[in-house]
Amino acid sequence: MYLIGDIGNTDIKICLFDKNYKVVKKLVLKTNLISNKYLALKLNFLKKYSKKINKILFSSVVPSVYSAIKKFLKKKIKQKCIEIKQVNLNKLVKIMVNHKQVGSDRISNAIGIIDKKLNYIILDFGTATTFDVVVKDKYLGGVIAPGVNLSLKTLISKASLIPPVNLSKISKIVGTNTSSAVKSGFYWGYAGLIDNVIKLIIKQTNKTFKIILTGGLAHLYKNTIKGKIEVKKDLTIKGLLKVVKNLK
């Protein structure tokens, strides 16, 4: 069996797959709650499968949390935990930038979508909004912008007259009250940012791309962004699974 996880700044996605790569268990943990007690509670189900798990692979952008999970799994399952950057990925993707400067979740996303035939821009709506450029079998690099929800929460916390707002699609650009004005600014503001970044990537590379959306707000922008758009929810996990299949 195979245990796979993606540690993000906000959430941690963990999936257990059987020998045929079918999902046995899938869960989401909160990154800021990680402790031995929390892990023991949430990962208690692993006791049942501990002797059957022979590969554990994670991507992580939070080293301290990865270290805590790694120690917990080593003690409970007695199986070595591997971070994706420790793996030789040359057969799956050619990384054209400094590996240390790219989040392992972004590498996993690239591996998850790469087919060595088409070009892709992967837009991930996470704590940060990231754009990653894949040309056939090459990862060229990307763009990092502030996350939509993070920016919205920061504005609400710093501006006393702005009420709590849940971001949603809004048809009119001109808001008639504070709430609708904020929604418009974030929805259409980020739509403009996204379209402009994609346009500039196309201009710099002189190539055509298929746009892949992933992360929490992917559904919100699916019909707003220009170009050929496809939403892939579990792209990072898919990439990690592809790496696991290639591990010896």
Image (cartoon, rainbow, N blue to C red):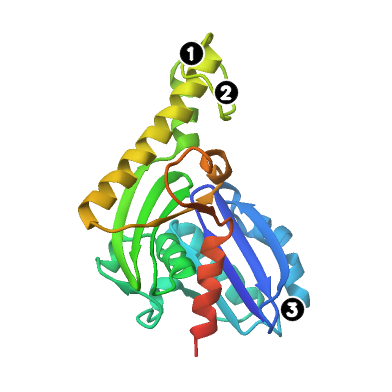
Q: Residue at x 63, y 60 (%)?
A: 36
Sequence-first disc among 3 and 1: 3
Q: Do callouts 2 and 1 mark residues in contact (Cβ within 8 Å)?
A: no
Estimate the spatial distance between the alpha carbons at disc 3 and disc 1, rounded to whole Å.
50 Å
Sequence-first disc among 2 and 1: 1
- Report if residue 71 is visible in the image: yes
The residue where tag 2 is placed is 165
Q: Residue at x 35, y 73 (%)?
A: 137
Position in image of residue 74 (x %, y %):
58, 76
The residue where tag 3 is placed is 49
Front: mark 2 or 1 = 2
Task: From the viewer's side, name the closer residue of 109 and 175.
Answer: 175
The residue where tag 1 is placed is 160
Which secondary structure lies at badge 2?
loop
Estimate the spatial distance between the alpha carbons at disc 3 and disc 2, rounded to whole Å.
42 Å
Front: mark 3 or 2 = 2
Residue 123 lies, with reference to residue 120, above or below; the image says: above
Q: Residue at x 58, y 55 (%)?
A: 233
